[in-house]
Amino acid sequence: DIQMTQSPSSLSASVGDRVTITCRASQNISIYLSWYQQKPGTAPKLLIYTASNLQSGVPSRFSGSGSGTDFTLTISSLQPEDFATYYCQQSNGNPFHFGQGTKLEIK
Amino acid sequence: QVQLQESGPGLVKPSQTLSLTCTVSGGSISGGGYYWSWIRQPAGKGLEWIGLIYRTGSTTYNPSLKSRLTISADTSKNQVSLRLTSVTAADTAVYYCARVTDYGGKGDYFDPWGQGTLVTVSS
């Protein structure tokens, strides 16, 4: 199985900050990685697929990059509604394991 | 717009069978380009992929659950179901279903998700 490791596990930041979350795969997954945002009490929401493609309706301040084993999710200017937990998920074949999550908190 | 709604008992006794249904509206579960997956999340923890069912009816399961798990589909009701046997407290979680856009296993992504249903395993 391909294992996914996110860092950091938690992060404190302020509105307007630029934030980067990292996801590392245990083996080469090419560009087959998705990012999800989850707010408390709600289902995860797709933000980005195939590493850098922004899902329709997702603000352009979100961006993704990377290939192979190392990936990043960047929020260019944090907004109050962005404080949530973020998960990466590999999509290079089953099982589609998720990372352990990164909780983004208000500083 | 496709919507998914999970349903089932909120409380299951240890050693019994957990059964959940995901009802899909706004689209057919047998339509092309998609398949269906279950994911769960214990309270305060991360997401665990459970398994999936393609529109052909073939399935793939998380190896850690494979011996206890069955995912099936009822096209007449436009529903996908999950059955997990011999449950323990470790199976207590919010269970989600999701539609998966099918790129042949390379770049598939989960969207949308149902709202989730909490299942507690307790006597």
Image (cartoon, coloured by chain):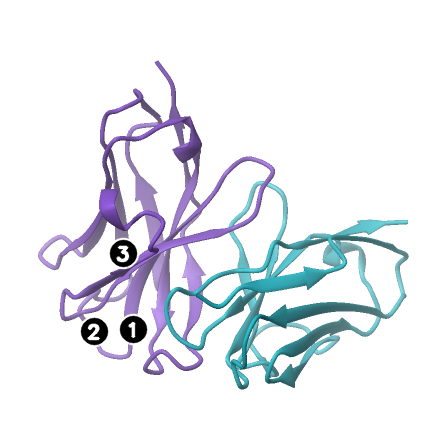
Chain colours: A cyan, B purple
Which numbered disc covers residue B31? 2
User: Is A96 situated above or below B47?
Assistant: below
Image position of B75 with respect to A66: above or below: above
Residue occupying the point 14% across, 65% down: B57
Residue A23's spot in the image, x, y percent?
66, 69
Q: Name the residue nearer the viewer: B37 or A27.
A: A27
Q: Residue furthest top?
A: B123
Q: Is residue A104 rendered to the left or right of residue A34?
A: right
Which label was assigned to residue B24?
3
Q: Is residue B34 above or below residue A11?
A: below
Q: Amino acid at mark 3?
A: Val
Does the residue at mark 2 contact the one at mark 1 (Cβ under 8 Å)? yes
Residue type, mark 2 in image: Gly
Type of the residue with mark 1 = Tyr
Left-right relation of A20 to B43: right
The foreground one among A15 and A94 is: A94
Q: Residues within 10 Å of mark 3 (few under 14, many from 20)?
A: many
Q: Which residue is mark 1?
A: B34
Name the residue at 32% across, 57% down: B51
Pointer 3 chain: B
Binning the other alpha carbons within 10 Å of mark 1 as few (below 14), some (14 to 19) or many (20 upward) gives: many
> What element does badge 2 sit on?
loop
| Chain letter of the residue beneath label 2 in the structure image | B
User: Marks 3 and 1: in contact by CB < 8 Å?
Assistant: no
Residue B110, x across and y down, in percent? 43, 66
Q: Identify the chain of the residue marked 1, using the numbered disc in the image.
A: B
Count the labels in the image.
3
> The C terminus of chain B appears in which quarter of the rendering?
top left
Query: Disc 1 on helix, strand or loop?
Result: strand
